[in-house]
Amino acid sequence: MAALPDKHETVTLDTFLRGLWQENPVFVMLLGMCPTLAVTNSAINALAMGLASTFVLVMSNSLVSMMRNFIPKQVRIATYIIIIATFVTMVDYAIQAISLDLYNALGAFIQLIVVNCMILGRAEAYASKQRLGATIINGLGIGAGFTFALLCLGVVREVLGAGTLFGFVLFGENFQPWVIMILPPGGFFVLGAWLLIFNWFRDRREQAERDLAEVQNER
Amino acid sequence: MSTTDTQSVTQPTPAFNMLRTLGLVATISGLLVVLSYRITLPMIEHNKQMAIERALFKVIPGAISRKNFEIVNNKIQPSGDKPQGIALYAGYDANGQLKGVALEAAAAGYQDVIRILYGYDPYCQCIRGIEVLKMAETPGIGDKINKDRNFVKNFEALEARPHASGKGLQNAIVPVKHGSKTEPWQIDAISGATISSTAVARMLNDASQQYVPIIINNLSVLENQE
Amino acid sequence: MNADSVTFIFLNAAIVNNFVLAMFLGICPFLGVSAKRETAWSMGLAVIFVMLVSSISAYGINWILQTLNIEYLRLICYIAVIASAVQLVEMTLKKFSPALFRALGIFLPLITTNCAILGVALFQTSREYNFVQSVSFSLGAGVGFTIALMLMAGLRQQLELAKVPSISQGAAMTLMLAGLLSLAFMGFAGLGASHG
């Protein structure tokens, strides 16, 4: 891996939007799958997990970006891990201070943000080469993409599996919840279904581009 | 990481640099962690107290204040800074009268361990309420142990009388099939969630067999704590 | 303290609450390294090994931290210990068993970011397991991971011959399969209850 000092990216709207759609960490890059599946049995858990991960991502990557010229190559991974673990510990205490119920619902998965490959991956691939501003914007974008993906799962699973959304009852008394959706298998099924939808969209777009190219070639 | 990097071979970073960076990062992270720990500690303590009290006042009807005790070597003593034995909470009403004690109990349920807090009234010698602290039972089936009205009714006055010999219970707490409860020490199981119901019965029986005689024998310790 | 029996902990971690299919730990390697049965087997062995080592070290670390009253450094210490444990295992294997190293070698660095390993350390702490319980828990988790990985690899090898729409190839199909496996594993629930 050639760690050539890439060109510094100029901050544009795309720096942010890319993480939301084109480089969505869950649907496109398939990173950070463990929390994606484990804590999305309700929308509120998904939201909390997304926000916590975003905070850790932005803060740790900012620090990495600020220190990018001081970190010797040989110890960079160790440094990144220490930085990430620090912010995760902070988030861990913050959530305990805000709400114990939420903390118990998320369980060990708050602390497991440390090994979310998404965060280490961004530190290595982006923050270690880019300026602070670009890193923060990009981190926010990726974080928003991650939160969005988690919410996609959490909302579907909670509505189908419990008949509620953010704790509010949606359907009448006679609604029979599809319990399997908030159980572990439901996580796999719903994520699989979302991936199918995303793949289908991508396929259609690529097909459209190919058709367009053909039409232009014929002219 | 076994790939040798040509760049680092030609111009090696001095060990001093690495140590400096790691030292700096470790210092920053240590500072941040200790800082956030110190700031959040009182809030977390407060939250934990609230959680215990919320559960406690639910399982001991009429209690409005509490005191922490622990069971060490079959004796009950006020708990110190470091937990030594089994935690036991005593609940008092407005006049400082002992209303009951609460203990934790646990047993393997359908999915994972079920952990509950139960309230014991030493005057009627019965269990007055349970509150599930942690469970992973199937939603809609096993998790009814928390909500099912008929099941919760079991714990309005579930008999747990100590045996005359001072060891164990006079009548063991047992689960029975739904709708066939005849004695005050029986637990009417939820139909369709037998395993979860049985687990609750078993953990209550195990805990009571062991601790009820101790509670009755040490009642004065609990009553005198104002 | 925790009164769970050693067999219950082992079975619970391996089958009833399978680390991959019920607890969602170690999904990344589960999706990434489950294409072939041979690699899945090697990966499983490597994970069992590292889990055992890191579980034992985590137990020691936790004891030290508790004696010194600095539990807030737990997470940082755990991740550092696991990273170095992986390195240590790698070096030891290289020196004493080159054959095994060749089989497991490429998977070892991957294991550092396997959340199942850190998960074992964190769960054994939060459940207050004693030493024997911790060891049995880590072995159970490792065995459970290997079982899930092997089952998945077997399925995927068969699946390569099947004709499916192009959009459902890859991760989407694997996740659906994992859902079915997870559904099947739910049938094991209640194992611990009857003779716990």
Image: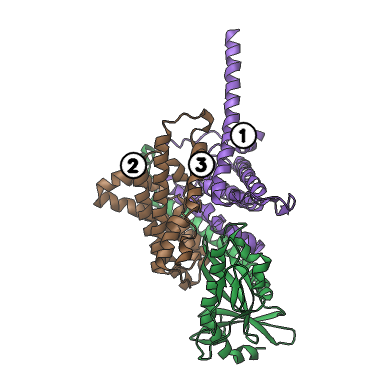
Chain colours: A purple, B green, C brown
- Image coordinates for residue C28, horizontal then vertical, percent: 47, 45
Decide: few, some or many residues near mark 3? Use Cα within 10 Å; few <14, some 14-19, many ≥20: many
- Image coordinates for residue B141, horizontal then vertical, percent: 60, 58
- What is the chain identity of the residue bearing mark 1? A
- Image coordinates for residue B64, horizontal then vertical, percent: 72, 79
Which one is in front, A190 or B88?
A: A190
Q: In this view, does B153 lie above or below C39?
A: below
Q: Which mark is residue C38?
A: 2
Between label 1 and label 2, give the one nearer the viewer.
Answer: 2
> What distance separates the C-alpha of mark 1 from that of mark 2?
46 Å
Which one is in front, B14 or B49?
A: B49
Q: Which mark is residue A10?
A: 1
Q: In which quarter of the image is residue A20?
A: top right
Q: Mark 3 points at which residue?
A: C175
- What is the chain identity of the residue bearing mark 2? C
The number of discs equals: 3
Q: Residue C85 carries which label?
A: none
* Amino acid type, mark 1: Thr
Q: Residue at x 64, y 74 (%)?
A: B155
Helix, strand or loop under label 3: helix
Which one is in front, A66 or A40?
A: A40
Q: In this view, does B27 lie above or below B131?
A: above
Q: In which quarter of the image is the N terminus of chain A?
A: top left
> What distance separates the C-alpha of mark 3 from that of mark 1?
37 Å
Counting residues from the start of the chain, the first of labels 3 and 2 encountered is 2
- Image coordinates for residue A54, horizontal then vertical, percent: 61, 48
Is residue B180 something that shows in the picture?
A: yes
- What is the chain identity of the residue bearing mark 3? C
* Amino acid type, mark 3: Leu
